[in-house]
Image (spheres, grey):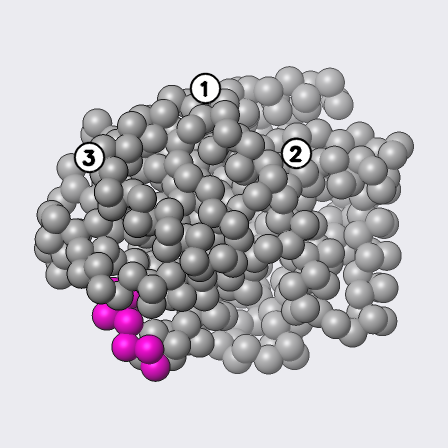
């Protein structure tokens, strides 16, 4: 069996889709499937071609036994809509011309978003005689519309039309959360939809294997400080203003600190807000490689996981949840719906606060300060839960069976 994974994002880039797809590829290969990846020259999140990949239109390499084919992509650090569209569509074009030179495959699995890559996937699936698997990690363009990122009605109409075309062409649609799966099933009742959740490598994210190291010392924190940590994309959907607003209410709690680690389009705005309010208890750090995350998680106390208060996100499970819980770090979860049901109600692995409600977040932190022993207990429950329900090995094994059915 041969499968080609088509994605704009892949290691050595850091991020949720990059890690998830690579972990899946490695596990499918271990099950005897021939896996190749067609992706872009790595540039995310800094929007600059990474060192060692410059001045190359295409490149072939092997990563952990996976053949990776890279094609050219337009990269600009401009935040304008034109630059963003050129970034997407340059890879749509170059990936097609690179992909059509490849041998035939049984399956072509595309990662969406970006939805525009669906054009390439549909064309290549015909050219390579491959059944199309459309993997949805975010309901785009619905999320872009609800967040107000895209407001042009003509553009939205065309995007929804492309989404429908991609789904109808697919032999299998996979959704990252049950909420995504249910949404697609309700709108496309005759399509084959399968839940392919995100998960965690519990052998890599194992608290027994790591010491806190010098993360606290390097960043000016003491062992008595209580660290609330957000790590990931600093974007529109996360609504990270809630952290700064809560920090403002807790400014007198000198042992409470908020760390925001990562990059994204909202980072500069949030840093400006921090400076304007003189929030010395808020600290911005640069993103780090995946290999460095377990030691950082070992050093912090509680993981902050917020999203904006939208019905759309009641079916969302941010990927950062899994790594934190595997490292026995409990959650302060500002996400209602599916994530709350799994990790707060069922696992008892943290505490829920109403999305975008900074007062509720500050109140929850005040309770934790008074009962620090509850942090360790919730963290232990979290690792137990993700080990049982979101183990990447089990997820890949189930997907392998699904591919055999589809063959």
- Which sits in the foreground, 360 or 128? 360
Quarter residue 407 falls in: top right
Tell me which segment is drawn in magenta.
276-284
Q: Position of residue 188 (x, y in %)?
A: 86, 39
Mark 2 to mark 1 CA distance (whole Å): 17 Å
Residue extending furthest toward the right: 190
Q: Position of residue 396 (x, y in %)?
A: 54, 25
Residue for badge 3: 210
Q: Earlier in the sequence, mark 2 or mark 1?
A: 2
Mark 3 to mark 2 CA distance (whole Å): 32 Å
Q: Residue at x 64, y 41 (%)?
A: 315
Left or right: residue 52 compared with residue 226: right
- Proximity of marks 3 and 2: CB atoms separated by less than 8 Å: no
Q: Position of residue 181 (x, y in %)?
A: 71, 36
Residue for badge 2: 178
Q: Earlier in the sequence, mark 3 or mark 2?
A: 2
Residue for badge 1: 388
């Amino acid at each position: 069996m041969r499968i080609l994974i088509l994605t704009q994002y892949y290691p050595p880039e850091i991020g949720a889709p990059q890690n998830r797809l690579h972990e899946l590829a490695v596990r499918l290969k271990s099950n005897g499937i021939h896996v190749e990846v067609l992706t872009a020259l790595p540039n995310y999140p800094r929007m600059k071609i990474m060192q060692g990949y410059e001045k190359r239109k295409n490149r072939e390499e092997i990563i952990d036994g996976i053949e990776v084919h890279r094609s050219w992509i337009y990269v600009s650090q401009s935040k304008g809509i034109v630059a963003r569209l050129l970034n997407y569509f340059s890879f749509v074009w170059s990936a097609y011309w690179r992909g059509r030179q490849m041998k035939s495959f049984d399956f072509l699995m595309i990662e969406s978003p970006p939805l525009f890559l669906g054009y390439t996937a549909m064309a290549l699936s015909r050219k390579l005689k491959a059944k199309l698997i459309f993997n949805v990690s975010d309901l785009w363009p619905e999320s872009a519309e609800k967040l107000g990122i895209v407001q042009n009605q003509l553009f939205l109409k065309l995007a929804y039309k492309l989404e429908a075309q991609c789904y109808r062409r697919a032999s299998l649609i996979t959704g990252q959360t049950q909420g995504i799966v249910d949404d697609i099933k309700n709108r496309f009742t005759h399509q084959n939809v399968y839940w392919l959740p995100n998960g965690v490598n519990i052998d890599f994210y194992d608290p027994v294997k790591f010491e806190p190291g010098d993360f606290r010392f390097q960043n000016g924190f003491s062992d008595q400080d209580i660290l609330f940590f957000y790590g990931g994309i600093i974007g529109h959907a996360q609504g990270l203003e809630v952290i700064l607003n809560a920090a403002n209410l807790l400014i007198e709690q000198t042992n409470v600190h908020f760390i925001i680690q990562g990059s994204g389009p909202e980072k500069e705005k949030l840093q400006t807000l921090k400076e304007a309010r003189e929030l010395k208890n808020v600290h911005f750090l640069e993103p780090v490689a995946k290999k460095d995350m377990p030691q950082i998680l070992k050093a912090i106390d509680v993981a902050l996981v917020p999203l904006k208060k939208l019905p759309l996100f009641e079916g969302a499970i941010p990927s950062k949840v899994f790594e934190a819980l595997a490292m026995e770090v409990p959650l302060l979860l500002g996400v209602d719906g599916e994530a709350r049901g799994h990790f707060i109600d069922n696992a008892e692995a943290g505490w829920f606060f109403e999305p975008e409600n900074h007062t509720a977040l500050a109140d929850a932190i005040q309770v934790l300060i008074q009962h620090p022993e509850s942090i360790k207990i919730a963290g232990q429950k979290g690792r137990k839960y993700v080990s049982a329900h979101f183990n990447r090995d089990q997820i890949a094994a189930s997907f392998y069976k699904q591919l055999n059915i589809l063959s």
